[in-house]
Image (spheres, rainbow, N blue to C red):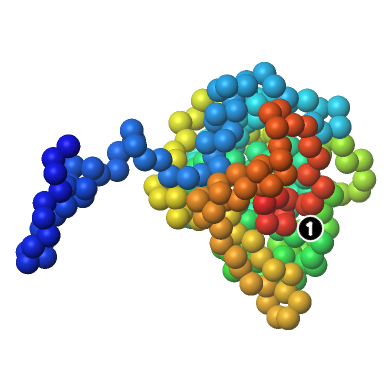
Amino acid sequence: MACAPKRGNNAAMISAYDRDLDRNPANFQPLTPLTFLERAADVYPDRIAIIHGPLRRSYAEFYARARRLASALARHGVGKNDTVAAMLPNTPAMLECHYGVPMCGAVLNTLNTRLDAAIIAFSLDHGEAKVVIVDREFSQTMRDALALCSAKPLVIDYDDPVYDGPGERLGSVEYEDFLAQGDAGHAWEMPGDEWDAISLNYTSGTTGDPKGVVYHHRGASLLATSNVVTCGMAKHPVYLWTLPMFHCNGW
């Protein structure tokens, strides 16, 4: 390597450390949790990724379904910095949203399922939701919220096979049918900048209107990694995430 030039009076002098050492795909990649799923599907395609009641789904299947979701959303005009809201409990669809939504450049807004229709309506309007995915369990609250809000998002119904309680379908398409419109081999794009928004969360509005909090790809990636370290997870753990994922996106 060439020796760094000596400092002189020329303020415009460029250091050898700044010359011809630009970022490129070989030496730099934005930090994002999206690569976690990509790697798991590549290295451990047949290992179980999701357990939900009798359902067992591998990492290869999980990754393919997330890419289908990204593809279907893109085909419906959803792209960078568009908001996709989710009124879902901890289900396979919720996990798929955490990857499929940012895979098309959009921002995931996980709605607090415990809040009332007025606060949900505020969040849909303030976040400018373009799509909302609704579990049938929360259809009553969401029906009232959609009537109150000005936003007119595409409503996608999710019918959790484990849930056998009351609820109705509100949207024009069911989640599985929506996924069928997507491509499992969709060539999703990395974020252009690790500072790009990946998710939007709202406070509970206890002292006024809810406050929106935006996470970026870098922060989500680092926090996910720190959780693995803090919890002392070894290889191939099987764990139950007990907090609802609308809370800080399951960290």
Kindly give the residue lying farthest to the right in the view shown.
165
In the image, is 25 to the left or to the right of 139? left
Q: Quadrant of the N terminus?
A: top left
Label 1 crowd bin: few (<14), some (14–19), many (20+), radius 10 Å: some
| Image coords of residue 89 (percent x, y) | 78, 48
Q: Is residue 174 visible?
A: no
What residue is rendered at 46% in x and 31% in y? Answer: 187
> In the image, is residue 61 above or below residue 136?
above
What residue is rendered at 70% in x and 50% in y? Answer: 250
Q: Nearer the viewer, residue 137 or 58?
A: 58
Q: Is residue 216 visible?
A: yes
What residue is rendered at 39% in x and 47% in y? Answer: 192
| Image coords of residue 131 (percent x, y) | 61, 52
> Number of numbered discs present?
1
Kindly give the residue lying farthest to the top in the view shown.
46
> In the image, is residue 163 above or below residue 55?
below
In the image, is 16 to the left or to the right of 235? left
| Image coords of residue 27 (percent x, y) | 34, 37
> In the image, is residue 187 above or below residue 190?
above
In the image, is 70 to the left or to the right of 246? left
Q: Amino acid at mark 1?
A: Thr
What residue is rendered at 76% in x and 77% in y? Answer: 206
The quadrant where residue 58 appears: top right
Q: Secondary structure beneath disc 1? A: loop
Q: Which residue position is annotated with label 1?
A: 113
Q: Nearer the viewer, residue 16 or 87?
A: 16
| Image coords of residue 84 (percent x, y) | 60, 52
